[in-house]
Image (cartoon, grey):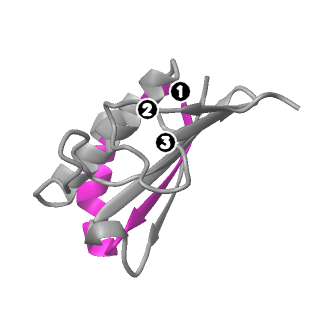
Amino acid sequence: MSEMKSVATRHAPQAIGPYSQAVVAGGFLFASGQIPLDPESMQVVEGDIRVQTERVLQNLAAVLEEAGTRLRHVVKTTVFLASMDDFAGMNETYAAAFGDHRPARSTVAVKTLPKNVLVEIDVIAQI
């Protein structure tokens, strides 16, 4: 069995519970869900779904970078939306961040998200 290693960076919101920002195991990084928190203030960023999605992806990029990988190495994402009405705005911002790279993705609407944010995203990436 391969060794597991926790990943932590101050450039993304700190874990505020019994979990890690990410774990590396078996040549993959498994990132915990990120919400649109500013890593310095730990406050939700103000703005619509595009602004919130951009912050989430910036947070994920910081975690990936700390582990030595990037968004282009993401193989799977899960997107949680508070409302499917926000799908188009999230998708536009998501597509801009990933460029030509197209990881597998699931997108689901949920009743509520932490701090009543509009979006949360987690990723699995190759190291």
Cα gap from disc 1 to disc 3, whole angstroms: 17 Å
Q: Is residue 41 left or right of residue 11?
A: left
What label does residue 24 carry, if any?
A: none
Give amino acid for label 2. Val
What label does residue 73 carry, if any?
A: 1
Q: Earlier in the sequence, mark 3 or mark 2?
A: 3
Q: Determine the image quadrant of residue 43.
A: bottom left
Q: Is residue 28 left or right of residue 77?
A: right
Q: Earlier in the sequence, mark 1 or mark 3?
A: 3
Quarter of the image for the C terminus: give it: top right
Q: Residue at x 40, y 81 (%)?
A: 111
For the residues labelled 3 and 2, say whether their Cβ atoms are less than 8 Å apart: yes
Secondary structure state at the residue bearing disc 1: helix
What label does residue 21 carry, if any?
A: 3
Closer to the camera in the image, 67 or 99: 67
Secondary structure state at the residue bearing disc 2: helix
Residue for badge 2: 63
Q: Is residue 8 magenta?
A: no
Q: Residue at x 38, y 43 (%)?
A: 14
Cα gap from disc 3 to disc 2, whole angstroms: 7 Å
